[in-house]
Amino acid sequence: MSIIEAIVYDIDGTMVNSEPLHVSAWDEALRTSGSELSHLSDNFRQTMAGKKPIVIADKIRTATSVIA
């Protein structure tokens, strides 16, 4: 039996900032639907940081012509 000596938990942005990857993934998904995030304001995109995917999807659906 081993003893756990340490656990590393990364709250996004502490050790690895994956937010640009998430934005890129959402943008790619939207491009396949004929839309994109780049036309949305920086402020709008910043409000998506840290939100659950379902919340982000609802915000994007409201701000674009993408229909889910």
Image (cartoon, rainbow, N blue to C red):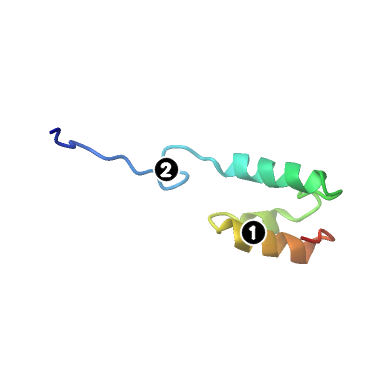
Report the label total: 2
Front-most of residues 11 and 30:
30
Residue that numbered label 2 is attached to: 14
Q: Which mark is residue 56?
A: 1
Q: Is residue 26 left or right of residue 34?
A: left
Q: Is residue 22 left or right of residue 61?
A: left
- Per the image, label 1 sits on a secondary structure element best described as helix
Q: Within 10 Å of the Cα at label 2, are there few (<14), some (14-19), or many (20+) other Cα atoms?
A: few
Query: Could you tell me residue 25's position as x and y percent?
Result: 67, 42
- Quarter of the figure with residue 10: top left
Find the residue positioned furthest to the bottom.
Answer: 62
The residue sitting at 61% across, 61% down in the picture is 54
For the N terminus, the image quarter is: top left
The residue sitting at 70% across, 53% down in the picture is 42
The residue sitting at 74% across, 45% down in the picture is 29
Query: Could you tell me residue 37's position as x and y percent?
Result: 76, 50
Q: Which mark is residue 11?
A: none
The residue sitting at 77% across, 55% down in the picture is 40
For the C terminus, the image quarter is: bottom right
- Judge whether 24 appears above or below 61 on screen: above
